[in-house]
Image (spheres, helix red, strand yellow):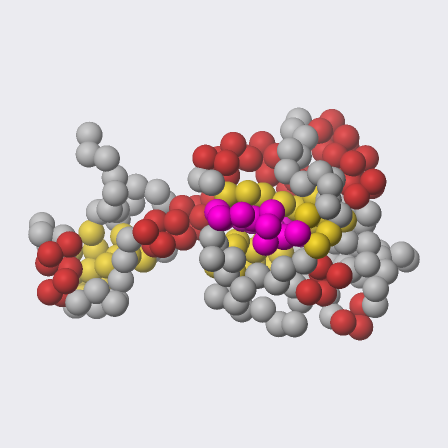
Amino acid sequence: MSLRINDIAPDFTAETTQGPISFHDWIGTGWAILFSHPKDFTPVCTTELGTMARLQPEFDRRGVKVIGLSVDPVDRHALWADDIAETQGARPGFPMIGDPALAVSKLYDMLPAAAGDSAEGRTAADNQTVRHVFVVGPDKKIKLMLAYPMTTGRNFDEILRVVDSLQLTAKFRVATPANWEHGGDVIIAGSVSNDEAKTIYPNGWASPKPYIRIVPQPGMVQA
Ligand code: BEZ
């Protein structure tokens, strides 16, 4: 099944390190991040899971639930968590999905149907395309999809930055420019007419071109 932004994130049931889940029920009414790994005890992924474990308070603060997936069974994930705690200084507090039958990996188009239905005998390189990040909104729709090569560790600060943008632009009719960070200027959405914009932004906006209308980030508490 191919997936695109704005598709409903496919629902599934799976074993996790914190017991069985039904994905949509587990998400509940908020935001979620699913990030995936090709195999346990792989070096780049070990650093990524430690980094996510350290950053979890930042995701909690934004109301984003985090769940990992790795193609091995959950009993191996528990052993891997010990290594992650030892080498990265942080133990994942979020659930890790076991995907030994490759079911979720195929459902999310991270592996082809031809991959079969067992992780047995498959190497990390065989599963190397299982290195995605999906951000799912409260409406259960996919808001962001990122795919990474096996040799490049993910930048979790960037994922937090995108969450900030997604949550801001879900609340206000704005878009965020390149390299935007929380507190930076934003762009009035194209769906807002100039007449509407005058009522929303009575102080006006900077406009280097008529189609670029820049205002301070809305919703900031004034000092
Ligand atoms: C890793 O180091 O995390 C990794 C190694 C091989 C394939 C995919 C990931």
Q: Is residue 94 one of those drawn in magenta?
A: no
Quadrant containing the N terminus is bottom right
Residue sitting at 80 percent across and 73 percent down? Answer: 114
* Picture coordinates of residue 192, whole percent (x, y): 21, 64
- Residue numbers of the magenta segment: 22-36
* Picture coordinates of residue 201, whole percent (x, y): 14, 53
User: Looking at the rendering, which quadrant does residue 127 occupy?
Assistant: bottom right
Q: Is residue 39 at all visible to an observer of this figure?
A: no
* Picture coordinates of residue 54, whole percent (x, y): 58, 32
Q: Is residue 168 at all visible to an observer of this figure?
A: yes
**Left or right: where does residue 178 sit relative to residue 77?**
left
Q: Nearer the viewer, residue 111 or 9?
A: 9
Residue sitting at 48 percent across and 66 percent down? Answer: 6
* Picture coordinates of residue 9, whole percent (x, y): 57, 61
**Left or right: where does residue 38 sit relative to residue 175?**
right
Q: Is residue 68 above or below residue 213?
A: above
Q: Is residue 33 one of those drawn in magenta?
A: yes
